[in-house]
Image (tube, rainbow, N blue to C red):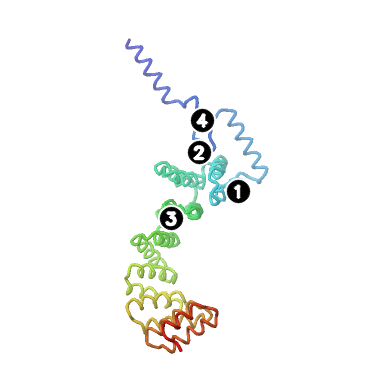
Amino acid sequence: MKKLLQSIGLICFLLISLPCVGQTVDNKVPMYGEVPKSKKYQEMDEDFIKDLVKQFGSKEKAYEAHIKFALSYFYHDSLALSMKRFNQAWLLDPDAPECYFGFGALTEMKGNYTEANRLYALGFKKRAKKERVEEALLKIADCQEHRNDFQGTVNTYHRITEINPANIFAYKKLGYLYSGFDMKEESLFNYSKAIALDPVDKGTYNNRGYLYHKNKDYEKAIVDYSKAIELDPKYISAYVNRGLSKNELEDFVGAKEDFQMSADLDPKSPELKRYLGYAKYNVKDIEGACTEFSILLKMGYVEAQEWMKEINCK
């Protein structure tokens, strides 16, 4: 009886250790399901690779082409085809990182974060230089963002900052993405990281200032807008935004000066004329406000007629 039980135990161990007889190669999952391939399949793979080398000139060029195909399908929401192309790229070069990041991103979209992290980790271990890994992740993030995959996109940008804490673009994108989902603390943190790394980027100051404005922290918003204007004295958006923040603090004179500057920089903009008209009204310059609204009316801005009635223009 004891020997019989030992034999059964050995059989069970073998059944657990060996691939199931029913396992099949599947090009709809990463690395074809990671199952052992039969000799016939291996010969088919070799023939496939030979054909691609003839078509593209080398294994390396064939790999690059298939990564481009995979990313294009991913970007345009053909996810099954994207997986197939990533698999073919992996077949051509299993030591390159891009295919693993593609596998990870597609798996992450299905909510399987543990498996996705494993696949990303495999990509990080491959022989590529750091610059190549960053470039690959940026392309993945672009596809994820295009598909409105917020969580996948921010996860990928965080991976970029982990391998390169000096990647300014990644922090800017994280600030922008978190801002769009009203995640204020996360957005402020990443905008501030970007500014620390690139203190002469007017756009990031303007974006962080806008976030402060949304948080009703108007003094900090004005500081950031002023820095953006210092970096670019013709930065219309920063003048308008600073004027709006000054309005909230009831600094109507300062607001009018900013709206005047923005309108001077772009005299053909009806929207800037409207801001200036109301700014003049707020400082009791009724005649000036009426003049601005009258110009708007001549420019075809029919709503200006109602505004002129509101402030009793003659």
Q: In the image, residue 186 lies at what x, y percent?
A: 35, 59
- Which amino acid type is marked by label 4? Pro
Instruction: Give the quarter of the figure containing the N terminus.
Output: top left
In the foreground, 283 or 168: 283
Q: Which mark is residue 234?
A: none
SS at mark 2 in the image: loop
Q: Which mark is residue 65?
A: 1
- Which amino acid type is marked by label 1? Ala
Upstream in sequence: badge 2 or badge 1: 2
Cα–Cα gap, marks 4 and 2: 14 Å
CB within 8 Å, label 4 to label 1 = no
Q: Is residue 278 above or below residue 66?
A: below
Residue at 42 percent of width and 26 percent of height:
17
Name the mark nearer the viewer: 4 or 2.
2
The residue pinned by badge 2 equals 29
The residue pinned by badge 4 equals 36
Upstream in sequence: badge 2 or badge 3: 2
Q: In the displayed image of the protein, which residue is found farthest to the top?
A: 1
The residue pinned by badge 3 equals 157
- Which amino acid type is marked by label 3? Tyr
- Which amino acid type is marked by label 2? Val
Residue count near mark 3 (Cα–Cα under 10 Å), binned few <14, some 14–19, many ≥20: many
